Amino acid sequence: MAEKSFKYIIVGGGVSAGYAAREFEKQGVKPNELAIISKEGVAPYERPALSKGYLFPEGTARLPGFHVCVGSGGERLAPEWYKEKGITLILSTEIIKADLPSKTLKSAAGDTFKYEVLIIATGSTVFRLENFGIQGADAKNIFYLREIADADKLVEAIKSKKNGKALVVGGGYIGLELSAALKINNFDVSMVYPDPWCMPRLFTADLAAFYEAYYTKKGVNIIKGTAAAGFVSNEKGEVKEVKLKNDQVMEADIVVVGVGAKPLINLFTGQLEEDKGGIKTNAFFKTSVDNVYAIGDVATFPMKMYGDIRRVEHVDHSRKSAEQAVKAIFAKEQGKEIGAYEYLPYFYSRAFDLSWQFFGDNVGEAVIYGNRDPASEKPKFGTYWIKDSKVVGAFLEGGTPEENKAISNIAKKQPTAPTPDSLATEGVQFASPP
Ligand code: FAD
């Protein structure tokens, strides 16, 4: 059993770990000071690709093509980059115990890792249907999507069940992106979710109506207001039928489940303060223990703009929180200070020919505008959210890069809102005057 020591250890090797490594390098980390320990067998990559390009039949995304930091237009950090910079990548290694008082981590293989500064970047894990006691949920060909190994299994099934029937469980962005990817792969796709409309945490009924109509036009069969209640397998143990709560029975060669995720913080329970399901941090991502930081999906941090604390499961925050934490670590070592984390929530999704972006807060009155005809060549529409007479959130489907930038400025500056009617008439021009 080996024991290794590093000045800095990042546990978890996903998006935030990769962006943290780049920032460590910018800040002048010395060779052999930093290690990234990851359960996955590959260097950090842009996770959103797994539900998009990774599944496409043409123009397929594969590593090393989407290692961080290409998703934000930065340099691609292939495994050689870490080697060159003297950053140790310890892959296919799961940490199963963390003892913060002795600054020690233990891996499943029994190795010990000592650190001076720890960054927790363990991300999230998906909710699994077997945990809800759903009958037959352990059948073969029921898939979840979080890591590259999950995506590889799904790709295999897409090949072996060519032109088959797929049922997607869940109406969030993962469900929407996966339904589109399966349809593009020529599957007969149905989507089932219990909510009255898709993406209910972000979409208003009006926004969802467009996406549901568009998906229907593409041939995706949407079944709302019900959920998977049980699975029936064939003699090989592969899923064959899905029973729904409304007594409908759906044939399926593949089931893909996207019903949410929870942050992976169990290693630290009882050792760090928690809030809102995550590890509580300050505006520099320092936890309740001085030399321990938490970034990405696991961090519950002060959201300066809105005067509250939040946990955010979006890729943009995982990148920016990583950079903020590393800057703070180096500033502290040099007796300097940096500004508090200023984050404007940003989330996006792409499916079929659609592409939307959202900035800010989706609270208050929603005002929708634009062309929402699912049959039109280039639908373009958006929504503004008005709270306390200010525009606090903005969503845009089909925007140009300049328009997306303009709506992000609106969500940041929070201008006084005109009347809902004139906001609806002005549409994107309110953000981006001609
Ligand atoms: P992750 O990137 O999940 O990385 C965590 C890493 O830690 C993983 O490699 C994991 O294996 C490792 N790990 C966990 N526990 C241990 C342990 N005990 N020991 C060692 N290693 C461990 N966000 C958007 O804004 N837009 C999108 O379009 C979008 N698409 C997405 C599509 C998919 C399929 C998924 C799964 C997520 C998507 N997201 C999207 C969310 C975004 O990817 C996450 O918010 C982001 O990856 C979080 O970064 P992270 O570093 O906190 O966690």
Image: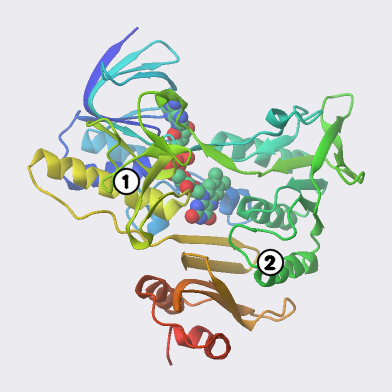
Identity of the residue furthest to the left in this view: 335
- Which circle marks residue 208 in the picture? 2
Q: Amino acid at mark 1?
A: Ala
Residue 155 in the figure: left or right of residue 62: right
**Residue at 44%, 51% in the rendered image:** 315
Instruction: For residue 15, say whether it is visible.
Output: no
Drawn side of residue 194 relative to residue 276, left or right: right
Q: Position of residue 291 (x, y in %)?
A: 22, 31
Colouring of the image:
rainbow
Depth check, front residue: 49 or 306:
306
Q: Secondary structure at mark 1?
A: helix
Query: In which quarter of the view is residue 97 placed?
Result: top left
Disc 1 residue crowd, few under 14, some 14–19, many 20+, Cα 10 Å: many
- Closer to viewer: mark 2 or mark 1: 2
Residue at position x 51%, y 61% in the image: 348
What amino acid type is highlighted by mark number 2? Ala
State whether residue 143 appears in this view: yes
| Mark positioned earlier in the residue sequence (2 or 1) | 2
Indicate yes or no: mark 1 CB to ligand 1 under 8 Å: yes
Q: Is residue 102 above or below residue 321?
A: above
**SS under mark 2:** helix
Residue indicated by mark 1: 322
Task: Return the x and y of residue 400 as percentages of the image width and height.
Answer: 48, 77
**Res 286 quadrant in image:** top left
Label pair 2/1, CB-CB below 8 angstroms: no
In the picture, which quadrant includes the C terminus? bottom left
In the rendering, which numbered label is found on residue 219?
A: none
103 to the left or right of 65: left
Q: Nearer the viewer, residue 127 or 315?
A: 127
Image vertical order of residue 87 relative to residue 322, above or below: above
* Image coordinates for residue 46, horizontal then vertical, percent: 45, 48
